[in-house]
Amino acid sequence: MSRWGKTYKDKRNWKEYNEELVIRGKFFFDFDFVDQWGSELEKMNLGKRGSPFLFPESFMQFMMIWHQYLDYRGLEGMARSLVNLGIIPEYGDYTTIWHRIHNMVPDIDISGIQYAELGTDGTGMKTNNAGSYRIMKYGDPDARQRKHLVVIITADVKTKKIIGIESHIEGTGSSEPETASTHIKEAVKKGINVKTFYGDGAFDVNNLFNLIHSIGAIPVIKIRKNASTDRQRGSKHRRKEVREYREKGYKQWAEEKHYGMRWPGTEGIFSAVKRKFGENCVSRSTEGLKAEGSQRLWIYDYINQRAKMEVNQMN
């Protein structure tokens, strides 16, 4: 089968990319929280009622990263080692660590971004750890009741910078188009000039086309096969895109609009996260699952973007 479109040319700077992958590993031992331990706790406890915080938020984010590989008792053991090495002044037991990071959902830092070409997509994560052999051997009696965790992200398709994360149990929470609208509005509110929005057929909805037009961005959204151009209803901005899509046909439209760009910014991120952390969740509660989905994407974005920044400073 012949490939349509231009032949793919890999323009990636492999030397820089290799260095990024190496540098990502450094942030698993990022002890910046040590220097600000006292000052951060002072700010956190200012005006606080009840028992004071004993551990800064930056340290708990450090533990949250390691929780992708260690359980809570393992984290306590790790904290004990850090005390023995003289890196931190004290450690908390696994219950303390659980209370601090179980439902932690850190904010995505999008400060300093001026322009963005955004794409939104979702993926599913498994909420059981039964194992494929066990299910194959004994079946899965809870399959009908079990729901997947749905994680939706919006990211810059060129830099792979995540600007928004939505995590919820399947059948609850916002839809992909609703989530995209929320993330776009938040980005614009924070001063980001959204130039383009990429989405598959699930985003072919009137409200999203209207929003994209209102902020002066270009929609690159695949049109559904049964799309209507009825003048009496719907969005005039969507009708315009439908007519263009039909006139050119999918292949020409996709090539001219660079529709394939949405893959690196969404599917590429999901693929990297699942390779690194797996796609099985360990939390059992609804809130814990939602937080776990957000945490995995936040950690990937944090490590990825800091590595890119460090490589850029080296050049």
Image (cartoon, rainbow, N blue to C red):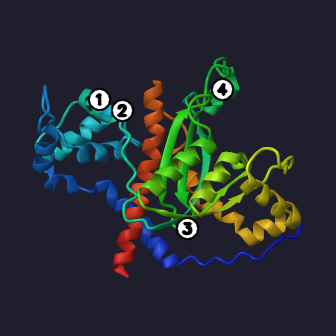
- Whether tag 2 and tag 4 are in contact, CB under 8 A, the answer is no
The residue carrying mark 3 is 158
Question: Alpha carbon of mark 4 to alpha carbon of mark 1: how far?
Answer: 32 Å
Callout 3 environment at 10 Å: few (<14), some (14 to 19), or many (20+)? some
Question: Alpha carbon of mark 2 to alpha carbon of mark 1: how far?
Answer: 6 Å
Question: Alpha carbon of mark 1 to alpha carbon of mark 3: how far?
Answer: 37 Å
Quadrant of the rendered image containing residue 247: bottom right
Can residue 18 be seen from the camera position used here?
yes
Q: Earlier in the sequence, mark 3 or mark 4?
A: 4
Question: Alpha carbon of mark 3 to alpha carbon of mark 4: how far?
Answer: 40 Å
Q: Earlier in the sequence, mark 4 or mark 1?
A: 1
Three-letter amino acid code of the residue under disc 3: Lys
Callout 2 environment at 10 Å: few (<14), some (14 to 19), or many (20+)? some
Q: Residue at x 33, y 54 (%)?
A: 28
Q: Residue at x 14, y 45 (%)?
A: 43
The residue carrying mark 4 is 135
Q: Earlier in the sequence, mark 2 or mark 3?
A: 2
- Whether tag 2 and tag 1 are in contact, CB under 8 A, the answer is yes
Question: Where in the figure is residue 303, as x and y percent of width and height?
Answer: 39, 58
Q: Earlier in the sequence, mark 2 or mark 4?
A: 2
Q: Residue at x 42, y 72 (%)?
A: 19
The residue carrying mark 2 is 102
Question: Alpha carbon of mark 2 to alpha carbon of mark 3: how far?
Answer: 32 Å
Quadrant of the rendered image containing residue 304: bottom left
Question: Where in the figure is residue 153, as x and y percent of width and height?
Answer: 54, 49
Q: For this view, does 36 lie left or right of residue 123?
A: left
The residue carrying mark 1 is 99
Q: Which mark is residue 121?
A: none
Callout 1 environment at 10 Å: few (<14), some (14 to 19), or many (20+)? few
Three-letter amino acid code of the residue under disc 4: Ile
